[in-house]
Image (tube, rainbow, N blue to C red):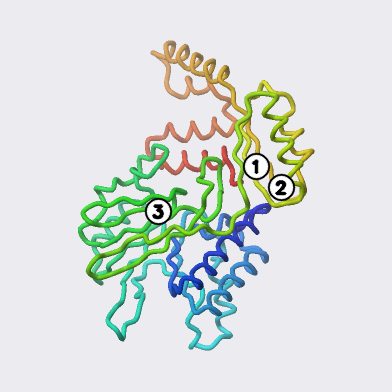
Amino acid sequence: MGSVERGVDFFRALLSVVHIAEKQGVRDILHGGDILDTTRLTSQVSEQLQEIDLACREAGIRMHVISGNHDACKPHWIESIRKVRERLSDKERGGIYLVDNQTISIGDAKKGDTLRVLCLPSMPSDVFLQRATADTENADVLLWHGPIREFCGYPDPTALSITDLPTNIYAAILLGDIHIREFKTHNDCLVGYPGATEVAKSGDPIDCTCSLMEWDRTRGMKVVENIPVANRPVYPRRLDSEEKVQAVMQELRQIKNKPALFLINYADSLEDVRTRLNMVAGPNTLVRSRSYTIGDAVSLASAFGFQAAQMDAKPPEAFLQGIVPPDSDIGRTAAILLNPDADHATVLRDFVDRLEPSI
């Protein structure tokens, strides 16, 4: 939530998770963070959060949420929930709950069948490891918002390896942050990401789901089913000819006013692709287009190779100035990366987010 154009899509997707949980008889939802993609708690975002909170309360479902690296808004988004909850009876069981740095219990304590979850928000990997390995409350499951190398689709020097994780302590380590649905087992510990509830960026999986999980103290944690959530239909298309452009234009005409998201990757040798597609798209259809070219990539690689051969006696700053404009985004990013004390992984990830903004 929080996106100007797609905020409603993200809201509906999360609301559908609540409805799925109610239908499945689930009473607790673990949310791995980034419930928002904004640093501003607007009135629309507050109303959407309150509606999801109401749906949880009416269904008797608790949604346990940790803070991610994209939802650090001020005031904190939980404040919009607290204002409403202050007027409610303490007997209300359901709702959205922020559980940063808490160990929560899920299940029926009277039956002695409870799952204890240590919930850690986004934090540096070394701090996370200290907290995770120093668990003194005997949690069964660890919930964290952060990157694990074996699941990353990009190099991240701050990402931990699955072998770094305290898999000998927990039955499962459930993660947020990376938009991928994948689980692995290490030391009989289930480790993985359930994926995003909506397509947020180009390259995200288009089959968005929530993971229905089952806990048994003897058998541990397992994924029972990945259930599709309510999403705007997504149509990824790669256009390398005029015939394919015409075919997509026909698709857009046929869809008319139905909600849809077209992710277009087109050869820049084709003329006016963005304009032509947007002209035939209906008011409820979103078209996100970006161009690609092989020729420019080859030329850029050649330029870097030539410059590298000439830089024997030059400092890195001088080499940089000859390649990218210093006042451009890539120039400023590259300048920061020259500082050995910079948080290189965060700088690169922020740059990629700006390069491929949320869709």
Residue that badge 1 annotates: 262
**Please, is residue 232 above or below residue 269 in the view?**
below
Quadrant of residue 267 in the image?
top right
C-alpha span from label 2 to label 1? 8 Å
Label 2 SS: strand
Residue that badge 3 annotates: 193
Confirm or deny contact between disc 2 and disc 1 (CB under 8 A): yes
Number of marks in the rendered image: 3
> In the drawing, does residue 60 fall left or right of residue 289?
left
**Please, is residue 85 above or below residue 270 in the view?**
below
Assess disc 3: are there few (<14), some (14-19) or many (≥20) residues with their C-alpha within 10 Å of its C-alpha: many
Q: Tell me the residue at 24%/60% (across/down).
A: 133
Q: Amino acid at mark 1?
A: Phe
C-alpha span from label 2 to label 3? 29 Å
C-alpha span from label 3 to label 1? 25 Å
Q: Please tell me which residue lies in front, 135 or 309.
A: 135
Label 1 SS: strand
Label 3 SS: strand
Image depth: mark 2 or mark 3 in front: 2
Residue that badge 2 annotates: 285
| N-term mark: 2 or 3 | 3
- Residue occupying the far right of the picture: 279
Q: Tell me the residue at 54%/42% (across/down).
A: 353
Q: Amino acid at mark 3?
A: Tyr
Quadrant of residue 161 in the image?
top left
**Please, is residue 263 above or below residue 240 in the view?**
below
> In the drawing, does residue 44 fall left or right of residue 36?
right
In the rendering, at what x and y percent does residue 340 appear? 37, 35
Q: Tell me the residue at 32%/61% (across/down).
A: 222
Assess disc 2: are there few (<14), some (14-19) or many (≥20) residues with their C-alpha within 10 Å of its C-alpha: many
Confirm or deny contact between disc 2 and disc 3 (CB under 8 A): no
